[in-house]
Amino acid sequence: DVKVTQSSRYLVKRTGEKVFLECVQDMDHENMFWYRQDPGLGLRLIYFSYDVKMKEKGDIPEGYSVSREKKERFSLILESASTNQTSMYLCASLLRAAWPANYGYTFGSGTRLTVV
Amino acid sequence: QKEVEQNSGPLSVPEGAIASLNCTYSDRGSQSFFWYRQYSGKSPELIMFIYSNGDKEDGRFTAQLNKASQYVSLLIRDSQPSDSATYLCAVYKDGNNRKLIWGLGTSLAVNP
């Protein structure tokens, strides 16, 4: 089974801190995504990457950046954390060759970030 | 108008009944449709995928797609309390670099 691992399940950071959220997948997937999920707002795409060093902005990129130096790892960076970035952050990946077959996205278990 | 719309619920059904979850989409160019289940505090997991008009069955789950009317539905037969979760509908259009468009989800409660 494909595994997508997010480094932290819960994280508490202070306003103004630089925050790194890590996501690693173990099945050579090309596409990786970062979402945040908030009650009533659903899943919102922050950034995605379709190859090493390639990235595209999603719907809400402001205040975030990403890094993909290796195929298996996609990092989300909060440049200066603010309280409105308190949220559940979800990483996902997919294998392009299998799309749009039954595989869909594989999600990590999520990181619950609280900014105080 | 949202691109993908779902009733937020909660939809409440008794154990053993059929739960019917609906999703409408606005873009006629949409090609592939996914249903994900998300338990509280957990991440979404794929349960069904459909791209052809008609029905697709997998165990107790049936996905129904009607492209002319722009809706996709999910039926859960013999509902169990363990089916209580939020069900997310997601839609894909070719050329969108494999980005899904997500509905906000429908909360389902199956009562014993």
Image: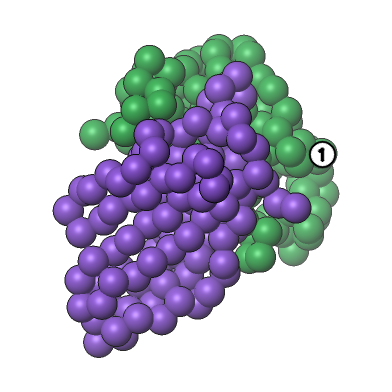
Chain colours: A green, B purple
Tell me the residue at 45%/40% (across/down): B33
Q: Is residue A24 left or right of residue A44?
A: left
Q: Is residue B30 left or right of residue B62?
A: right
Three-letter amino acid code at disc 1? Answer: Glu
Q: Residue furthest left?
A: B59
Question: Image quarter for residue A48?
Answer: top right
Label 1, secondary structure: give it. Answer: loop
Q: Look at the picture and state if A31 lies above or below A53.
A: below
Residue A112 position in % (x across, y down): 56, 57
Question: Image quarter for residue A67?
Answer: top right
Check the picture and name the quadrant holding the C terminus of chain A: bottom right
Tell me the residue at 80%/54% (across/down): A82
Protein chain holding label 1: A
Tell me the residue at 69%/23% (across/down): A56
Q: Look at the picture and state if B28 lies above or below B11.
A: above
Q: Look at the picture and state if A34 lies above or below A95.
A: below
Tell me the residue at 60%/47% (across/down): B25
Which residue matches tag 1? Answer: A62
Residue B60 position in % (x across, y down): 20, 59
Residue B94 position in % (x across, y down): 56, 22
Along the line of sight, which residue is nearer the eye, B59 or A29? B59
Along the line of sight, which residue is nearer the eye, B12 or A73? B12
Q: Residue furthest front?
A: B68
